[in-house]
Image: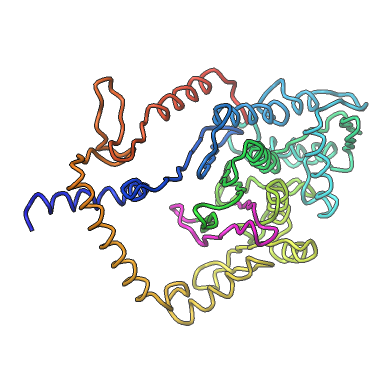
Amino acid sequence: MNSRLVGNLIAVACMIVACPSLTRHCFGQSSPQMLEVSGRTMGTTFTVKIFDPPEFAEDPAFLVDQLLRRVNDQMSTYLENSEISRFNRSNSTEWFPVSDELASVVAFSQLVAEKTGGAFDVTVGPLVNAWNFGPDRAERAVPDGEVIKRLRESVGFRKLSVRVDPPALRKSVAGLKLDLSAVAKGYAVDRVVALLNDQDAEDLFVEIGGEVSVSGNKAGQWWKVGIQMPDAATDSVLIAHSLNVGGGNDRSMATSGDYRNYFEVDGTRYSHTIDPRSGMPIEHSLASVTVVTDFCMAADAWATALNVLGPEKALQAAKAEGLDVLLVARDQSEASGYQLAANGSLNQYITAEETSAESGVPEEQGNGRFTMFVVTAVAFALLLFAMSVGVLFGQRSISGSCGGVNGTKNEDGSVSCSLCSSPSDACRDLRKRMNEKSENEMVDV
């Protein structure tokens, strides 16, 4: 085999890894693309992935950005002129007109509050601020007990009323304030999915600050969402769960935990999750709660509610509500340092973990591992040979992977891949537009 052939084989092998869609182009097949839109909203990041996107009448990045801005204008406590901020500043105990969307989110929140005896409570805002986890963050310090006692007088879901027709909110005490941070991200995820579905985008992955909802699938494969290991120094994945849209109520996932946002004073750890019933950060062993359900707003709210309840009561509530949950509690008596409990579809991972521990081999890697290796190796070799022939006899140069660092620059400075025919100019223009929007927007939640 001459050196030129070897060089081309190596180059093509590199491009297969970097640009999987190359295989379809070489054989004249259509190439489903993955359109990705990302940015910042609600004090965190968002990611939207659209597999095999349709022809949009408007720029999908603009549509998503416009929707998220509307949600912020309604529910962000970081924006002074948002609906919720104006309601919080009002001292009136009369009905306060709001949008249909805000009223519906508050109404759902009140339902979860009732079912959990106040463990979930959107009036907890003043207490969150007192513990310096709200928009007015100051030096992390433990608030005085008298301050907590006074604030609790204006906290409580029963001091809040909501009506949906006409939409309005009413507080029974002037100092009552709302904080929808435990439900607004999930609501926004649901809205983005609905928006893009209306634009004929069927296969979606939408994530805002770790809250996820999906639609359809990706090339026949279910979307997988990772559940992280609590307290890990890196973002190591404990479980990768497939959101099987066609299998029932599991198209959305939300996780709540105390391992990301907390502070320590004199060796005591204070979680950002405040128990509205006591005014204090949670202190039990529950480190992480994952809820999988039909809608992300529900998953978001219930993940927080169960996290407040603690391991035993959380599992009881999940069973009573028929929720699919995974609870990860700290337990030093366990070799891993954690104890897992689950309900519904997520119970499979409890069994899987036990099987893995007994055998010493992950369950998914046991049966058929050697067979899969052989099949994969043969298929890769055949594909590599066919593609090499196509490149050599087609007299086409290899200019680099699509979007990779080896992309060839055109005279005008643009970059494109000569084999994938996928110019990066559109992505570059989109990023520029999003950056311009970000520079001009107000600080949001």
Q: Residue at x 65, y 30 (%)?
A: 67
Towards the viewer: 400 or 173? 400
**Picture quadrant where residue 416 is located:** top left
Q: Residue at x 70, y 49 (%)?
A: 295
* 183 sits left or right of 394 in the view: right
Above or below residue 407? Residue 258 is below
The quadrant holding residue 351 is: bottom right
- The mark total stands at 0
Is residue 247 highlighted in magenta? yes
* Quadrant where the C terminus is found in the figure: top right
Left-right relation of 225 to 159: left
The furthest residue to the left: 2
Q: Nearer the viewer, residue 284 or 297?
A: 297
153 over 291 or under it: above or below: above
Extent of the magenta region: 232-258
Whether residue 431 is visible, yes or no, is yes
- Residue at the outermost bottom position: 358
Which quarter of the rendering shows the N terminus? bottom left
Q: Nearer the viewer, residue 375 or 171?
A: 375
- Residue in the foreground of this view, choosing between 50 and 321: 50
| Residue 172 belongs to the span the image colors magenta | no
Residue at 45% x, 81% y: name it.
Answer: 359
Whether residue 350 sits left or right of residue 155 in the image: it is left
The residue under the point 59% across, 24% down is 443
- Looking at the picture, how far across and down is residue 37, in whole percent? 51, 35
Q: Is residue 132 visible?
A: no
Residue 246, how many percent across, how many down? 65, 59
x, y (%) of residue 430?
46, 26
